[in-house]
């Protein structure tokens, strides 16, 4: 019945439908708002390979999560394409009962090498991060680790594969940093079939120097774009959809706005996250996670391990009360809140 609480839900009635899996904590970019070079320098210690979950372990967690209602998986990082053999993991995950959609978030540089294999493996859709079309600004925002043409080549290679769920571009705008790129990006991706989404700059992690004044509100951006290319709102496709979607009245396609700062959507959040080293997080802004790796690597029969995982995930999710974005303006009761870094659990 409409309005009924789902059979498996957290304390606020939110089901678990999406699992975002970080397969790699490392990245080949050093974007200042995620992995600034001053912190993540050449001597920074990332996880050793044996500290990351294996593909077998990731598959087991995903299977248990699917049994609890998860239907969508997203592979992320860091940069997930730095993980060798990623297409093989996609193949495994596509065969899990209940999984309907597998997506990838990437900076795009390595897509020309991997897009065809990922499509053949059953990947549903691709999201590529791109914050500027100005080569100089792009180089600065990626920490000097890549050239704009490499990402544009990656976008072209993904588009050529005709992924069932299409290709999306995620852009994080910062006031006085790259907000001038908004209209050029819209102009570039109109009529391409690629969906551009603008994401409000968020206070993820602890190292990006975030301030509210740096946020370009979605409403302001919407009005700026609509003044040039009129927009019409589209209805959400499902509960928990994070982007508010619009179509161009001239038929040039679709655009989206993710307003996690100015219009939080915690009330419908159905997303859980699995870190590279096997910690389960119930919020992008979480301070702690639940160790699943210890359960996965305990000396137990497979069915015992999966039963333990099922009980643990069930308990953690049923007790979930996270709604950080709705509480952002309120100071934490015990002072500074040390949040998990985004590269560690994915965006």
Image (cartoon, rainbow, N blue to C red):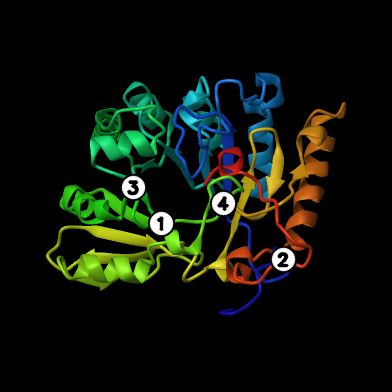
- Find disc 3 in the rendering and name its residue: 168
Q: Earlier in the sequence, mark 1 or mark 2?
A: 1
Q: Is residue 309 left or right of residue 170?
A: right
Distance of label 2 from label 4 (alpha carbons)? 15 Å
**Residue 324 appears at what percent x and percent y?**
63, 64
Distance of label 1 from label 2 (alpha carbons)? 25 Å
Q: Earlier in the sequence, mark 3 or mark 1?
A: 3
- Compared with residue 118, is residue 178 higher up or lower down, i.e. above or below? below
Q: Earlier in the sequence, mark 2 or mark 3?
A: 3
**14 vs 108, nearest the viewer:** 108
- Compared with residue 89, is residue 172 higher up or lower down, i.e. above or below? below
Secondary element at tag 1: strand
Q: Residues within 10 Å of mark 2 (few under 14, many from 20)?
A: few
Q: Determine which of the numbered discs, if any, sits on residue 204 in the image.
A: 4
Secondary element at tag 3: strand
- Find disc 1 in the rendering and name its residue: 199
Q: Earlier in the sequence, mark 2 or mark 4?
A: 4
- Find disc 2 in the rendering and name its residue: 332
């Amino acid at each position: 019945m409409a309005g009924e609480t789902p059979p498996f839900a957290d304390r606020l009635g939110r089901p678990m439908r999406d699992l975002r899996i970080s397969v790699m904590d490392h990245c080949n970019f050093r974007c200042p708002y995620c992995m600034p070079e001053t912190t993540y320098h050449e001597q920074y210690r990332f996880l050793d390979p044996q500290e990351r979950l294996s593909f077998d372990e990731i598959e087991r967690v995903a299977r248990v999560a699917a049994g609890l209602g998860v239907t969508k998986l997203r592979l992320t990082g860091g940069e997930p394409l730095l993980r060798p053999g990623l297409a093989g993991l996609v193949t495994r995950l596509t065969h899990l009962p209940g999984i309907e959609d597998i997506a990838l978030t990437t900076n795009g540089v390595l897509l020309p090498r991997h897009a065809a294999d990922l499509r053949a493996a059953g990947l549903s859709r691709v999201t590529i991060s791109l914050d500027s079309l100005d080569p100089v600004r792009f180089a600065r925002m990626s920490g000097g680790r890549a050239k704009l043409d490499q990402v544009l080549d990656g976008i072209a290679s993904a588009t050529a594969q005709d992924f069932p769920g299409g290709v999306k571009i995620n852009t994080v705008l910062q006031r006085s940093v790259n907000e001038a790129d908004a209209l050029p990006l819209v102009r570039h991706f109109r009529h391409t079939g690629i969906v551009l989404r603008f994401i409000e700059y968020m206070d993820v992690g602890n190292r990006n120097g975030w301030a509210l004044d740096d946020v370009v509100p979605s409403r302001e951006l919407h009005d700026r774009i609509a003044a040039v290319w009129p927009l019409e709102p589209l209805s959400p496709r499902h509960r928990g959809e994070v982007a508010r979607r619009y179509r161009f009245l001239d038929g040039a396609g679709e655009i989206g706005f993710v307003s996690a700062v100015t219009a939080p959507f915690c009330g419908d959040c159905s997303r859980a996250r699995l870190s590279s080293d096997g910690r389960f997080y119930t919020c992008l802004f979480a301070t702690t996670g639940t160790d699943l790796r210890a359960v996965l690597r305990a000396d137990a029969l497979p069915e015992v391990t999966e039963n333990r995982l099922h009980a643990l995930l069930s308990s953690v999710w049923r007790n979930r009360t996270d709604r950080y974005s709705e509480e952002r303006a309120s100071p934490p009761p015990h002072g500074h809140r040390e949040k998990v870094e985004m590269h560690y659990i994915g965006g």
